[in-house]
Image (cartoon, coloured by chain):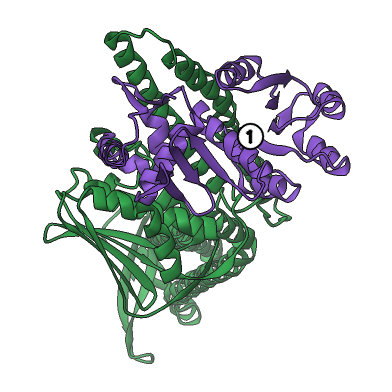
Amino acid sequence: MKLLKRTVKNYILYSALLLLICTPLYYLSIHRLFVNEMEEELFHHKNNFKKTLDKLENEKDIQLYQLINEEFQLKETSKWPISDSLFTYSQYDSLEKTFVPYRALRTGVTVQGTRYELLIRESIVGNTKLVTAIVAIQTTLLVLMLIGFILINRKLSKVVWDPFYTILEKLKNYQIDKDLTIDLPHSSTAEFRDLSEALVHLVNKSRDAYLSQKEFTENASHELQTPLAIFRSKLELLMQGADISSEQAELISSLLNATDRIVRLNKNLLLLSKIENRQFLSRQEILLSSALTQSLGLYKQMAQEKEIKITTHIISEIAVKTNPSLLEILLSNLISNAIRYTPAQNEVRIEIEKKSITIRNPGEPFNFPNKIFDRFNRESRTTQGNGLGLAIVKKICDTEGIPITYHYSQGSHLFSIDF
Amino acid sequence: MKILIVEDERELAKSMVQYLRQESYVCETAYTAQEALEKILLHEYDCILLDITLPDGNGFTILEKLKKEEKLEGVIIISAKNSLDDKIKGLNLGADDYLAKPFHLSEMGARISAVIRRKRFDGNNSISVHELTIDLLGKVTTVNNLLVDLTRKEYDLLLFLISNKNRVVSKNAIAEHLSGDAAEVFDNFDFIYAHMKNLKKKLAEANCPDYIKTVYGLGYKFEA
């Protein structure tokens, strides 16, 4: 759920709840106020009436008074004393043709020695109407306020949150290995400005760390070359000795082999960081088939020694625009990988069709097919390879933006690159 | 033959000198660019091994100086960088070859002998060891003027061994010399044994004495 919806949803829920609870409360309290007021009025009337009692001299006066003041009713009674009591009742109004509610006060009065029951009443129809009207207006006001609030909030949120979404979009698209810096919008909202600044700071720091780490790999590999050269040269000199026992020869041979492995590993690490550092910039239009022929030339002999047949099927010629060195490394690594994992007396089949090149070779399935492009994955530990060949392939494909896929089907490994 | 080694890593320079001294080379060393420039102006060399990164300057400036003085002896650039740009720049400035660290001493030996041969080229670019002659232009091997039909790899192998005459050449160096990076594909050096066997057989059939000695567990040595 979007932040905007979430906040608005809560506001609406709260407002609705408020409306539901407050409207009856409001109604009840206004109503109560009116009734109280009315009752006070009734008592007031009673007192006024008592003051005028002395002026009413006979039965006739009383009837006249009643006629003038409709709300007064006097009835002779034998019940005595009558205490003051308040009650509500309805009476049919023939004029309005409806039941009309009244609030009434019953009390006892003595006029010229005769005991009367006095009933003073007041219609509460007008009051109820007033209360209803007030509550209706209040409710309408609240609803209008709510709608207005939602609309304003929506509009405002779009404007206010706009920098946030821009920042988010920029962050999503940022690639630490490709983009130099990140350019975030300068919002007038303090929070977003702070966010922008913090993010730019974070990105720059991460990028610095990334760069220095990249540089470190390259520098370390470079620095290793000279001591390796010294080590190898000393071994070769040691080898020249006149009387080397077979035991010593074996030791030297092991050291030479280990040196070879370190040298290759270091070379590949260096290559990997050079690709990462984008040191292969120049681009050329190259005919894929001729690049393939060139790379195959290096491995033809090797394949022959292993009695592996390499067949190429060029179904359609394509030209690719890329760095020639990278293309050569890419193809060579894939070919050498194929030769390495193909059992003797089998065939490596290379096909160029439409915009893709496919290299297929039979072999045992890999134990970790998902990890074949990882650096130093376990598969390669079992063989002479240094575990970087396919990582280099992947890195080249990634930097050049060409997709590579790997499948294993019907006992064959299948690498496919789409240019 | 006089060789100048310009290399700031003393231990490496020492190894190079020691290896080359076993052949008929006279070696001098310079550890700094300044030292190298002085020596270049004073002496004539048949070959200069030049490290590109020196403490007091870039090897390229020495190369430029050599070009200006028209003293471009056979220069082999040595670099720890192994970058294509450096290689092209060096070769464009007149260097003859490029060797990336860490190299095999035997590979260095082969490159030096190739550079010197090319320099001394006088219409008769060939190497002879007694009855064995290798014509480098035609890439033809003869024993007592009789042709020995060698494959490309066998020829390369023989030339590599002769270029490192009287020194043990490791299987590792041979594998890299013959196949470069492609040698990685193999888990062992069996393919060298096969080439070697064929080469020795062909030479023996041509009545060539067995100059190539197997140094058990290590490699081979051309003894003459």
- The answer to which of B194 and B55 lies nearer the viewer is B194
Residue indicated by mark 1 = B79
- Which residue appears at 44% of the width and 25% of the height? B224
Residue A409: percent from the left, percent from the top? 15, 61
Above or below A136: residue B145: above
Count up the numbered dots. Answer: 1
Q: Position of residue A126 (x, y in %)?
A: 47, 76
State the residue in front, A19 or B28: B28
Image height check: is A115 above or below B1? below
Q: Secondary structure at mark 1?
A: strand
Return the chain for callout 1.
B
Q: Is residue A46 visible?
A: no
Quarter holding the N terminus of chain A is bottom left
- The amino acid beneath tag 1 is Ser
For residue B72, above or below residue A21? above
Direction from residue B146 to residue B201 in the image, left or right: left
**Mark 1, other Cα within 10 Å: few <14 / some 14–19 / many ≥20:** many
The extreme front residue here reads: B144
Q: Nearer the viewer, residue A125 or A70?
A: A125
User: What color was chain B assigned in the picture?
Assistant: purple
- Pick the quarter of the image with the C terminus of chain A: bottom left
x%, y% of residue B96? 67, 44
Say if residue B36 shows up in the picture. yes
Residue sitting at x 44%, y 33%: B161
Question: For chain A, what colour was chosen?
Answer: green
When the figure is inspected, residue A408 is found, relative to residue B40, above or below; the finding is below
Along the horizontal axis of the image, is A210 left or right of A84? right
Q: In the figure, is residue A369 to the left or right of A224?
A: left
Q: State which quadrant residue A32 falls in.
A: bottom left
Q: Nearer the viewer, residue A181 or A341?
A: A341
* Residue B133 in the image, given as x and y percentages of width and height: 47, 41
